[in-house]
Image: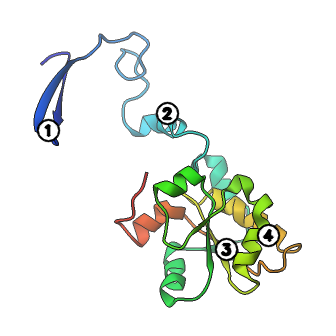
Amino acid sequence: MKDRLLMYDSLRCSFMSIKKPPKSKKCPVCSDQATIHSMSDSQHITEGARGPNVCPIPSPARKMATSIPRNLHVSCLEYNEVRTSGKEHVLLDVRTKRQFEICSLPGAVNIPLESLKDDLETLEQLSDGSKPVYCLCRRGVFSVEATRVLSEAMRDHPRISSVQNIYGGLLAWSQEVDPLFPMY
């Protein structure tokens, strides 16, 4: 089985053997001068492959998470208490429409971050001056920006009464609250 890859298809209960191409001298994985030795080494490659419309976690984004006051953050557990208490609120998911269609929390309203400034009137109607707005995204990075935008817009849009960021986003939600929540 040297230089071959054995694949198993559990749906069809079949095996397939594929001949691997010869090693490339410039390959970052299989060459003699390999630079990728583990999955963590290739993290920057996989994050780049996901595209520009997802929440990345590079170090500048970690700085962005501190760009709003600490009191504007709530943990997923704190937000879950709001949900289960039945308190009226607006859950604003700022991911792209396509990402929102993949998975979302029940009751979430999707206004992508790119169009948030243009849809403030819609959000004002939903909030109705009394319902707090909780911002959410995939990893809690874009929602920080949305929280910042909305907290600044509250001066000109008084029916948006309060806004908070759900720290860690849907990734933290799946780890802290609902392990069965699908992640992509």
Please state the horizontal and vertical placement of residue 28, each as a whole percent of the image. 43, 21
Q: CA distance from mark 4 to mark 3?
A: 18 Å
Question: Eyeballing the image, is 76 above or below 103?
Answer: below
Dot 4 and dot 2 residues touching (CB under 8 Å): no
**Rendered image: mark on residue 45:** 2
Look at discs 3 and 1 and give the one toward the viewer: 1
Question: Eyeballing the image, is 109 above or below 49?
Answer: below
Name the residue at 49% across, 79% down: 80
Q: Quadrant of the N terminus?
A: top left
Q: CA distance from mark 3 to mark 2?
A: 32 Å
At numbered mark 3, what does the secondary structure look like: helix, strand or loop?
strand
Instruction: Say what amino acid the circle numbered 1 marks.
Output: Arg
Residue highlighted by disc 1: 12
Name the residue at 29% across, 10% down: 22
Instruction: Say what amino acid the circle numbered 2 marks.
Output: Ile
Query: Crowding at label 1, few (<14), some or many (≥20) Cα neighbours within 10 Å?
Result: few
At numbered mark 4, what does the secondary structure look like: helix, strand or loop?
helix
Instruction: Say what amino acid the circle numbered 4 marks.
Output: Glu
Q: Nearer the viewer, residue 143 or 31?
A: 143
Residue highlighted by disc 3: 164
Question: Eyeballing the image, is 88 above or below 156?
Answer: below
Please state the horizontal and vertical placement of residue 93, each as a whole percent of the image. 60, 64
So how many labels did they put on this image?
4
Dot 1 and dot 4 residues touching (CB under 8 Å): no
At numbered mark 2, what does the secondary structure look like: helix, strand or loop?
helix
Outermost residue, right direction?
A: 156
- Residue 135 visible, this angle: yes
First in residue order: circle 3 vs circle 2? 2
First in residue order: circle 4 vs circle 3? 4
Q: Along the horizontal axis of the image, is 18 left or right of 152? A: left
Query: Crowding at label 2, few (<14), some or many (≥20) Cα neighbours within 10 Å?
Result: few
At numbered mark 1, what does the secondary structure look like: helix, strand or loop?
loop
